Image: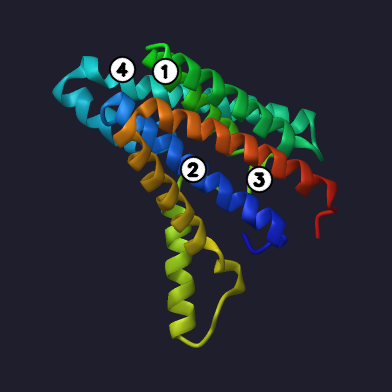
Amino acid sequence: MHRYDPARQRLALGLAGLAGLVDATGFVVAGGYFTSFMSGNTTRMGVELVKQPALALAPLGLIACFLAGVIIGALTGRRFAGRHKRVLLAAVAAMLGTGAGLLAAGFAIPFLVLSALAMGLANNVFARAGEVTVGVTYMTGALVRFGQGIAARLAGQPIPATRGYGLLWSALALGAASGGALCLIAPQIAAGAGFAFALLLWGFALRVEKAPAP
């Protein structure tokens, strides 16, 4: 996070919030599986392989969709270097919009597939030389960096590289809470909100990429 200027940091926070919103919506629709938190899906897959192997197909399928999204996003990022943020976010918004429409029409599985694909793509928005620099859909690493930063400050030796990770986790948590609240009204509304938010982030990415990176 510290390597980016404030505008790009805000975009990263927005993406984390979007991931939380989409993940919460997917969690409700899928009955306890995730569209962006693949560690959780992996744990559930492992447990269900032992208890009820047939049920392991659901988390395995979501993992495969997410992985496909990462691969497609990485290739797209290489192809559109320098303007990959706007291109990837346009694809993310298109997938989430299509998924929201399908969910409204009663097709839950295609919605989950497109959501997982979109979240895989989203992880390539902040990448350099083919490597992710800010993970926006998984927060274990962010919490580790946040904790290390707190420890360093307590020891009187602050580490600038740990700044911003607490905010990143908070953004995902806020997004998840928002998605959960909207799902209390209707999952379709939460899915639509995810699409609208992705569109806003795409517009913001257009502005960000017009400004030179620091």
Question: Mark 3: which amino acid?
Answer: Phe
Mark 4 falls on what kind of element? helix
Badge 4, how many Cα within 10 Å: few under 14, some, many 20+? few
In the foreground, 145 or 190: 190
- Closer to the N terminus: mark 2 or mark 4? 4
Q: Which residue is mark 4?
A: 57
> Would you say the residues marked 1 and 4 are in contact, meaning their CB atoms lie under 8 Å apart?
no
| Image x and y of residue 160, in percent | 61, 73
Query: What residue appears at the point 61 percent right and 23 percent down from the top-left corner?
Result: 94
Q: Which residue is mark 3?
A: 126
Residue 134 appears anywhere in the view: no
Question: Mark 2: which amino acid?
Answer: Thr
Mark 3 falls on what kind of element? loop
Q: In the image, is residue 23 above or below residue 13?
A: above
Q: Which residue is mark 2?
A: 137
In the foreground, 129 or 3: 3
Q: Which residue is mark 1?
A: 103
Question: Mark 1: which amino acid?
Answer: Leu
Mark in the foreground, 1 or 4: 1
